[in-house]
Image (spheres, grey):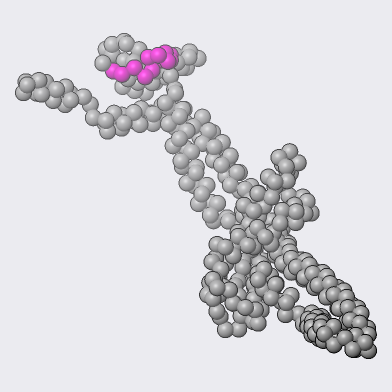
């Protein structure tokens, strides 16, 4: 067993180190590159130029922001629980920015030309991915706050055009404000209709009671004249009860006509007692030219492209340059004649002969 291990160790030690093989390969590629520097330089210049052109023509994303303040009326009733940041963000994104109005913004600015093929839902999702809603100074987290609760809502839009980014942020903020106002007005109109219907029903009932009182009063007069005391007493009680009911109805009608507390309570319960207003906006600056940055990137890209081109052309160069290439052909190396003055006279290269190439199936064969 020990002998077997010693044999394995000897085989392992006889193998050349990986680092030496890598160094030898890099040196071989360097020698091949030195023979043909022009193609390496041209390829490196082409790669560098292409990358730098892409970087120079790529438009940078700038961000515009419009800040809204969401305020709750000071006289509104405090809810039992606060409003977390995520819930408030979803309220703004989903309830205050309906798809129909987002589609209007997209059509107005002619955004996302692929929407004609992929549909308006695709464009709306793209617009949502282009904007971000941030919440801070959120006192809605607490059940009570002196002076009324409020929160700051930042609508940030990223775009390659600073003016378009700011306009989109303004449009989205206006959509949120308009939607909040419309929802409040819709609820107020619905409550007004309901109160009007209630008032009409009460007035109709009041007229019916007045008619009943009049009819019973006639019967009471007849019963009194005919000395029908039990009937007269019963009619008197009915008239008193109807009169009391009529007074209550009149008071309720007057309360509906003169007070808006009922509507205010319904608005508060629906969460629409809050108002939105723009308090700040941030216009993005146009990106300044990045001359020094581009020069630095060009130097780094050029060096990497030069190294990569040398490795690429050197690795796939199949011509015979040195003794290693001869050995890859399976031919014995008998000797090496160093360079001397006049060694180009009468050479194959001087006579226009093509340099021999290593066959592709032998190029990567390991030396045995």
Seen at 84% across and 72% down, the residue is 201
Q: Quadrant of residue 80?
A: bottom right
Residue extending furthest toward the front: 227
Q: Where's residue 84, x and y in %?
A: 54, 66
- Image quadrant holding the N terminus, namely top left
Residue extending furthest toward the left: 2
Q: Where's residue 123, x and y in %?
A: 70, 47
Q: Where's residue 160, x and y in %?
A: 66, 54
Using residue 323 as the reference point, say whether residue 295 is left or right of it: right
Using residue 16 as the reference point, say whether residue 139 is left or right of it: right
- Image quadrant holding the C terminus, namely top left
On the question of residue 156 being in view, the answer is no
- Magenta stretch: give its range: 356-367
Depicted 175 relative to depicted 33: above or below: below
Picture mark count = 0
Depicted 174 relative to depicted 256: above or below: above
Using residue 139 as the reference point, say whether residue 211 is left or right of it: right
Residue extending furthest toward the top: 331
What secondary structure characterizes most of the magenta part? loop
Seen at 85% across and 87% down, the residue is 229
On the question of residue 16 being in view, the answer is yes
Q: Nearer the viewer, residue 210 or 148?
A: 210
Q: Quadrant of residue 210?
A: bottom right
Q: Nearer the viewer, residue 20 or 228?
A: 228
Q: Nearer the viewer, residue 180 or 38?
A: 180
Residue 60 in the magenta stretch? The answer is no
Q: Where's residue 241, x and y in %?
A: 79, 83
Seen at 49% across and 44% down, the residue is 301
Seen at 72% across and 80% down, the residue is 261
């Amino acid at each position: 067993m020990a002998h077997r291990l010693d044999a394995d160790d000897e085989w392992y030690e006889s193998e050349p180190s990986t680092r030496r093989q890598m160094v030898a390969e890099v040196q071989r590629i360097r020698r091949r590159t030195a023979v043909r520097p022009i193609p390496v330089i041209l390829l490196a210049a082409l790669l560098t130029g292409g990358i730098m052109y892409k970087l120079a023509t790529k438009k940078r994303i700038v961000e515009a922001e419009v800040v809204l303040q969401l305020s709750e009326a000071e006289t509104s009733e405090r809810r039992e629980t606060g409003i977390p940041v995520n819930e408030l963000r979803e309220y703004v994104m989903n309830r205050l920015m309906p798809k129909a109005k987002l589609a209007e913004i997209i059509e107005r600015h002619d955004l996302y030309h692929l929407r004609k093929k992929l549909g308006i839902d695709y464009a709306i999702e793209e617009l949502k991915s282009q904007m971000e809603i941030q919440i801070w100074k959120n006192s809605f987290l607490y059940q009570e706050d002196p002076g009324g609760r409020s929160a700051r809502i930042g609508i940030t839009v990223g775009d390659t055009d600073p003016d378009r980014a700011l306009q989109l942020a303004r449009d989205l903020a206006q959509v949120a404000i308009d939607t909040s106002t419309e929802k409040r007005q819709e609820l107020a109109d619905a409550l007004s209709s309901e109160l009007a219907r209630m008032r009409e029903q009460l007035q109709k009932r009041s007229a019916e009671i007045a008619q009943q009182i009049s009819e019973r009063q006639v019967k009471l007069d007849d019963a009194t004249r005919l000395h029908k005391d039990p009937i007269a007493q019963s009619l008197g009680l009915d008239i008193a009860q109807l009169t009391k009911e009529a007074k209550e109805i009149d008071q309720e009608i007057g309360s509906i006509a003169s007070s808006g507390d009922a509507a205010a309570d319904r608005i508060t319960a629906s969460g629409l007692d809050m108002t939105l207003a723009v308090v700040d906006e941030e216009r993005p600056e146009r990106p300044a030219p990045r001359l020094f940055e581009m020069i630095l990137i060009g130097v780094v890209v050029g060096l990497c492209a030069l190294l990569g081109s040398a490795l690429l052309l050197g690795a796939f160069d199949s011509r015979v340059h040195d003794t290693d290439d001869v050995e890859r052909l399976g031919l014995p190396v008998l000797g090496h004649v160093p360079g001397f003055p006049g060694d180009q006279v009468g050479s194959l290269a001087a006579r226009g002969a093509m340099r021999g190439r290593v066959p592709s199936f032998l190029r990567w064969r390991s030396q045995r």
